[in-house]
Amino acid sequence: MFFARLLIVTALATQNALVSAAARYGKCQCLYQSHFNHGTYIISKPGEYKLCSNIQFAPGKPNSTASDEEIALAFDPVVVGGTAYEKNEYALGFFAALVIAAPNVTLHLNGYTIQQDPSHALLQRFFAVIELASAPFIPNAGPAQFVSKDLTSATNFRLNGPGTIGLSSHHGIHGNNNRNVIISNVKFQDFEVAAVSLNDVKGLSIVNCQVVRNRHDVPVLGSFSVARQILPYVKALKERKREYSMNLRGKKTTAAQVYTSLIRSIANVYRDVMEQGFVDSVSHPNEFKLFNNPHHVIDGPCYAFLVHGKGPAVGGQGFTMSVNESSISESVDIRNNQIENIRCFTNEVPALVVNNTVQIDARGAVFQLIDTLTNEWIACDKRIHYKGNVITDAQLMVAKAIHNGVLHDSPLLQTNVSSISKDLIKWAEDPESVFKPHFRCNGDIMHHVVKGTIVVRVEDTRGFTIKGNVINSATVLSGPAAATADYFKWFSRNRHSRNQASWTCSSYHNGSSVEDGTEQQLGNLRGISVAAVGSYHLKNNSTDHSCILGNTITGFASKNANCIVGIDMQGVSEGVLVANNDVDLSERVGSNTDDHYISFRVRKFASSGNVVKQNNKFVQDTLYEDIPGRKLRNKKAIPPQNHPHVSFVNEWEYGGCPFGKG
Ligand SMILES: *[C@@H]1O[C@H](CO)[C@@H](O)[C@H](O)[C@H]1NC(C)=O
Ligand SMILES: *[C@@H]1O[C@H](CO)[C@@H](O)[C@H](O)[C@H]1NC(C)=O
Ligand SMILES: *[C@@H]1O[C@H](CO)[C@@H](O)[C@H](O)[C@H]1NC(C)=O
Ligand SMILES: *[C@@H]1O[C@H](CO)[C@@H](O)[C@H](O)[C@H]1NC(C)=O
Ligand SMILES: *[C@@H]1O[C@H](CO)[C@@H](O)[C@H](O)[C@H]1NC(C)=O
Ligand SMILES: *[C@@H]1O[C@H](CO)[C@@H](O)[C@H](O)[C@H]1NC(C)=O
Ligand SMILES: *[C@@H]1O[C@H](CO)[C@@H](O)[C@H](O)[C@H]1NC(C)=O
Ligand SMILES: *[C@@H]1O[C@H](CO)[C@@H](O)[C@H](O)[C@H]1NC(C)=O
């Protein structure tokens, strides 16, 4: 009796709260699955919304009788949504299930789950369950021009749990230039890149959320996205009045041939994954070799929460705050969240450099010759004769057509980032042609800077509180950094392959911070990392410190790390208070200054304006980099060609590297 009454009282109280909210904002609009069946649902009016069913995003999902071509081209916004979707914004597919492009929107998950369907997650490798802006990139950033008119970013946005933001091939929530975002009481699971990732956000609270795990059944590598993204270009070449063709390996090859091979590969992967979860190595060995993800976790950048200054976080970790105050994130509060089971690896993809230029395709993907997961040549033989595969054939044909003026830049088929040189095309045309490849290391398949894994990353931010979070269990599965002694040792066990590559890195991605210019970071793991941050106000004083307070960090592992750091204060950071944290990275590791476990590190450019209280429990040792003596293992000396200080003023605007450059 007593309990029943209590329940009724609680229910009434909740209802009253809802009623008064409804009175304030007008009717709370229900969102059902049907709102998402024809593409991204765009909220463009202020108001209060709630989920009234679970949402599984797969608009235009191919059915069981779909042909190879229908599968390979599935989910095309132009086909599924007609004219409802702007060409620039949706050029790379439905980039979100739900877009918030209005001020003053509140969304209640209402106990339901919103997520990407596994079919869409496979074919649309770039995605956010909720995008907090009308486009996924700001103007003039990213691998294409995504903004047709203006970018409309959400302001005063609230996301209320209980409820779940589930499966996503990239982000749970992603946004640019947002103001006042509150995310509370939400469960995140099965995202690949990050639960929440916001660039240039002023006013953010992520509170009382639960990150159950990131996605642990990722079937494919980034190469699958490369295949899907290059396909529409080949289709355009096939459909010309005079069909395009070129010599590949000395043989005349038509666009139709390249197209047919590509769609068959994509469809083979799709059917395997839909039926059994992964690419079948027996029935589709070529697809398995090119696309299979051996670790089943994202093969690139990997976070729970990421806050960054203006622009995409594709460069290295921050060094100094942006000189332009308007580009800096402000007032970020990450509090009382529980983050568990983060598992990641980085697939370092050596980028081919010809004539001093990294060779990338029309969508910004690297022209890949070496598979660092097996150390094999994948598009040529040992004597460096072109052999090719479905991806490189397509990349070369598209590049040649761009050189020839056959493909022109258009919103759906943008061509400006393509940098594959005529020399490389000539090489692939002639089966006897040989060249000496040069590789630039420390980038991933999109030539983003490799920076290891960071569970909570806050940078280029003035004023933050990271408090009371529990981070338990983070594992990095990366192999040794490409072309290092450890790397070749790692592969000496499987010399059986006829295609083992013998090669070296000629240069390294220039995008890393000066602090990291001497290492390839793919194995590195950090719990909380702040870089290029300051206190809440311009004039720092003891009362307005940013803080890292009372966080607990446990259960970290990475076999090939140079360092595993609980709390890392990097770049020119000042006005940060670090107190009352409990960091015990591994039960088996104590305070040993010879190993690569560090509970707390302050890097050498952090100023003395930071305060570290004595009441932290740091089980592994602490490292102040300006105090000499502590060494890290495996550090590979890389020529200091890293991101120069001055670049933050204007060389690479917004602290990120231009795609494919560097
Ligand atoms: C499958 O989809 C196609 C068109 O997309 C349609 O013509 C066909 O009838 C569908 N087949 C089944 C079995 O639903
Ligand atoms: C959004 O909310 C703010 C603060 O409540 C209010 O000042 C503003 O007029 C609202 N904007 C719109 C478009 O509703
Ligand atoms: C690509 O370059 C051309 C010529 O410089 C320019 O007119 C066009 O706007 C560019 N396209 C994009 C999407 O930036
Ligand atoms: C700072 O950024 C804003 C908005 O991004 C821009 O309008 C302004 O020109 C920039 N100021 C400087 C000095 O670069
Ligand atoms: C090499 O780059 C230079 C300068 O960008 C250019 O003029 C030249 O044509 C390029 N050579 C080849 C073979 O692509
Ligand atoms: C610290 O700085 C802030 C902002 O400038 C100011 O409001 C506050 O009064 C300062 N506190 C002290 C003790 O100086
Ligand atoms: C903050 O304080 C530290 C030392 O107290 C000082 O080195 C730094 O320059 C100050 N920063 C600002 C922006 O005033
Ligand atoms: C990398 O940076 C160094 C130092 O700033 C510069 O000398 C070099 O030319 C850069 N390399 C590339 C490929 O941009």
Image (spheres, helix red, strand yellow):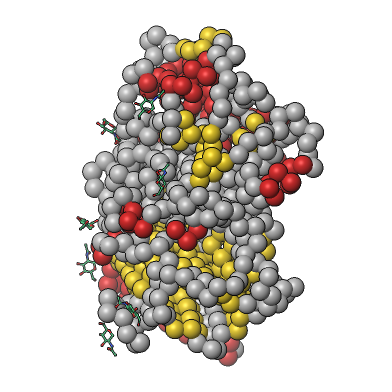
At x 58%, y 87%, the residue is 3
The quadrant where residue 319 appears: bottom left
At x 27%, y 79%, the residue is 539
Closest to the observer, 360 or 1: 360
Q: In the rendered image of this protein, does residue 333 appear above or below residue 431?
A: below
Q: In the rendered image of this protein, does residue 105 appear above or below residue 599?
A: above
Q: In the rendered image of this protein, does residue 310 appear above or below residue 39?
A: below
At x 40%, y 31%, the residue is 418
Closest to the observer, 95 or 640: 640
Measured from the top left, where is residue 74 in percent x and y? 49, 33
Q: Is residue 461 left or right of residue 473?
A: left
Q: Is residue 590 left or right of residue 190?
A: right
Measured from the top left, where is residue 639 in percent x and y? 50, 50
Query: Can see residue 645?
Result: yes
Query: Can see residue 219?
Result: no
The quadrant where residue 83 appears: top left
Q: In the rendered image of this protein, does residue 102 appear above or below residue 556?
A: above
The mark tally for this picture is 0
Image quarter in which the N terminus is found = bottom right
Image quarter in which the C terminus is found = top left
At x 27%, y 76%, the residue is 538
Measured from the top left, where is residue 269 in percent x and y? 63, 33
Measured from the top left, where is residue 494 in percent x and y? 78, 39
